[in-house]
Image (tube, coloured by chain):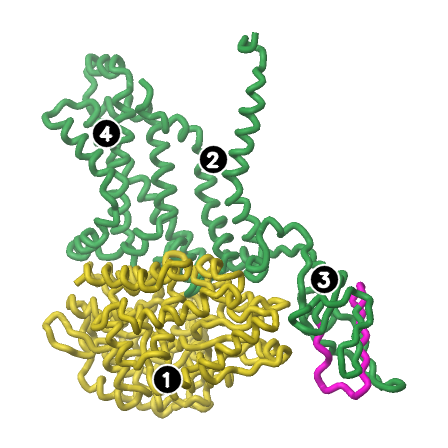
Amino acid sequence: MDNIAGHKSGLSWVTNISVVVLVVLWLIPTVGLFVSSFRERDQISVSGWWQAPFSVELTYRTRGDGEVRPVDGGYVMEGNIFDTGEVRSSFEGGASTVSAFGDRGVAPAEYPAGTVAEIGDGETLQVNADGTYIYTSVEEPGNRGPRVYFEAETPPQFTLDNYRNVLTADGMDRAFINTLTVTIPATVIPILIAAFAAYALAWMDFPGRGLLIALVVGLLVVPLQLALVPMLNLHQRLGIGQSFLGIWLAHTGFGLPLAVYLLRNYMVGLPRDIIESAKVDGATDFQLFVKIILPLSFPALAAFAIFQFLWTWNDLLVAKVFLPSDDASKVMTVKIADDLLGSRGGDWGILATAAFVSIAVPLVVFFTMQRFLVRGLLAGSVK
Amino acid sequence: MQRTLYASVAALALGTGFAAAQDLIFPVGEGAFNWDSYQQFSDATDLSGQTLDITGPWTGEDNDLFTSVIAYFEEATGAEVNYSGSDSFEQDIVISTRSNSAPNIAVIPQPGLVGDLASEGYLTPLAPETTDWIVENYAAGQSWADLATFEGQDGQTQLYAFPYKIDVKSLVWYVPEQFEEAGYDVPETLEELKQLNDQIVADGGTPWCIGLGSGAATGWPATDWVEDMMLRINPPEIYDQWVSNDIPFDDPQVVAAIEEYGQFARNDNYVSGGSSSVANTDFRDAPAGLFEFPPQCYMLKQATFIPTFFPEGTEVGTDVDFFYFPASAEKDLGKPVLGAGTMFTITKDSDAAQAFIEFLKTPIAHELWMAQSGFLTPYKDANTDVFPSDSQRNMNDILTSATTFRFDGSDLMPSEIGAGAFWTGMVDYTTGADAQTVASQIQSRWEQLK
């Protein structure tokens, strides 16, 4: 009775749960990156992003800096520990609760809050939970107040500084425009060329067609790194040099094999009847291509457009090689890697933020065109 | 219409005038700088209308600092200089020289790479008198000149690079207040340092933070340790022979240096997190242990650039300080200093490129960067009064008072070794492999290259 339509199998729960688990697993890095993009570098190095939403016990070091008053048999200094100079900036959001304190770095939480601690030389120190401290000394204290270490609850802190830094960096707008200048032609040009080529390879009979297709498929496995130096050399000799035209040509060249292969496989799967009837009616190859093949191949074109757009948008290597290295022609990836991250790349906060800023546009492209992507991925696989 | 046009032109002119004035961060003629050298250079050189392209490894803050030095060159000569830094400069420069798109000047951080490019004929040799200039004016000048001299494509041995901006690697960073609280003294000799290790352990602490992690370059901090140990237990000649592979990598003297490093890094009591965490800790995260309470460690051996990775607001000199990684008293090898630096090479010759090398010979070119941050120089005529802090002056003193200076050996070895087998070998050794075995493996890789 189990597998009758309308009845839910007990196994569907297992399926649902495992889907949820897989989705969560896949999302973890992205969520981590997202949370980190709202944290400062120091916080990132102290605690993991999963601890970010919770208060944490942190140890602080400060120095009593209140007024010293003489009293019977000694001197007294009073004040609030959260107001002392060295930690004031950490508690701007409001006071916290002290859980323990100490006077030596090796034992920063030696005494629970509220106890009066003898710290030697006739000095005592008391730090209460609310942060008030009393320090007494038999002899007149020097001009530096007593060292105090204390442990306090620290509320979670988030900041928009990283986003401010990335978005307002000098020349970021220019880099954004440059990226678009590279990406759009580098997506359109290969599609134009590949659509023609794919039609010819799919529907026009000429000798050596099979060999040509095999050659294109073969080109898919050639790593583009191999072609960088010879290509650039060629560009220099042709007078194109390092320029936007050069990078369009490079991206076109590197994208063509996949484009031709993908589109040709899709076009070959179009119903022969339509094409033959059109030919019988006297359509030329060009008319056939423009009026029938192109509209029918739209899903495959869109799928390839998304692939090519994402890859050129994220590209760092090709942009570094084929564009001049001056500020005016930096694309976003180069700008982030070379200008924002600094010489030794330790700024995780900036890195995470930059990742989110730079995926914004591809995300929009992806979500508006994803229905084509799903259909396009099946391109050529089902007849 | 006409009027708005004039107004906007005037505004533009004002704006650019202001921007140019702002570029010179120290007004000409003020302060302890050698402005005479600037004036002389300015009077002798006129490059109006010429442009000069420079590429180098400095990005982010370093990029801004170098640009501020360039501004004076532009002001003095009228030339226009475009500097662009790249995070992957060592790869980029190889691609651009091979594909004829090289800049005029390339700032190369690895002498080994300079040698490669010179032997392939991509570099223009510097004027012969520059060699004499370096020998005379740099502290330990001969070792600098030798470092920048290579055999070119034509088989002639010539000077191909001008060293400028040096990093000192033989430094140990510590928090003075923690030393004070615990009653430790800064060790003067390697033997004292080892005693201090044991004393810290006896007091229940951990002496060292060591992190070898650095992405694809994981392992390089360990090579610095080994190189420093080489200079402390062997004479510098042995170091040179090791770097050029005239003695094999698995020579007992080299293995002894590796084991000397192992005494620090492979002792669970000596390293924060135990020796197994050394290879997994990122070198950028390692300093954090110094600043925790209780301190996870008391000392960190790292180069002059490391303050970039200290927590924000940390002041060098008060919150944290450094001492010279001490030399061995028993061995009596003087005060060897290990360092690294960048080399200016001419990749596409032009008047402006030659003039820029001349500019680097003026004291002012050094002082302008010294007065900001992160710059050390062996140039004896540069006025150390311009350093903004005592700690930077002390660092420079370590450099100028060195009896022996040696460049980071891993940068001098062929890159398959110095930026490959040596790194991974040190990770293997740190995680438990035998020193002799690791050294033999590196040596056999090296022999395959010959």
Give left or right: position of A282 versus A111: left
Which residue is identified by label 3? Answer: A152
Q: Is residue A184 above or below residue B309?
A: above
Q: How far apart are marks 1 and 2 (CA)?
A: 69 Å
Q: Is residue A235 above or below residue B140?
A: above
Chain bearing tag 4 is A
Snapshot quadrant of residue A206: top left
In this rendering, position of residue B162 left or right of residue A102: left
Q: Mark 4 points at which residue?
A: A198
- Near-viewer residue (B439 or B418): B439
Q: Give the range drawn in magenta.
A: A128-148
- In the image, residue A131 lies in the stretch drawn in magenta: yes
Answer whether residue A150 is magenta in the image. Answer: no
Q: Which of marks 4 and 1 is in front?
A: 1
**Residue indicated by mark 2:** A367
Towards the viewer: B340 or B124: B340
**Which residue carries the number 1 mark?**
B331
Identified by mark 2, the residue type is: Phe
Picture quadrant of residue B413: bottom left
Q: Residue at x 44, y 80 (%)?
A: B190
Horizontal placement of B423 versus B393: left or right?
A: left
**Mark drawn on residue A19:** none
Q: Earlier in the sequence, mark 2 or mark 3?
A: 3
Would residue A183 be found to the left or right of residue B302 on screen? left
The amino acid at mark 1 is: Lys
Density class for disc 2 (Cα within 10 Å; few <14, some 14-19, many ≥20) is few
- For image coordinates 25% across by 78% down, the residue present is B147
Determine the CA span between mark 4 and mark 3. 68 Å
Q: Which chain is depicted green?
A: A
Q: What's the residue at 18%, 57% (across, down)?
A: A236
Amino acid found under the numbered disc labelled 3:
Ala
- Nearer the observer: mark 3 or 1; the answer is 1
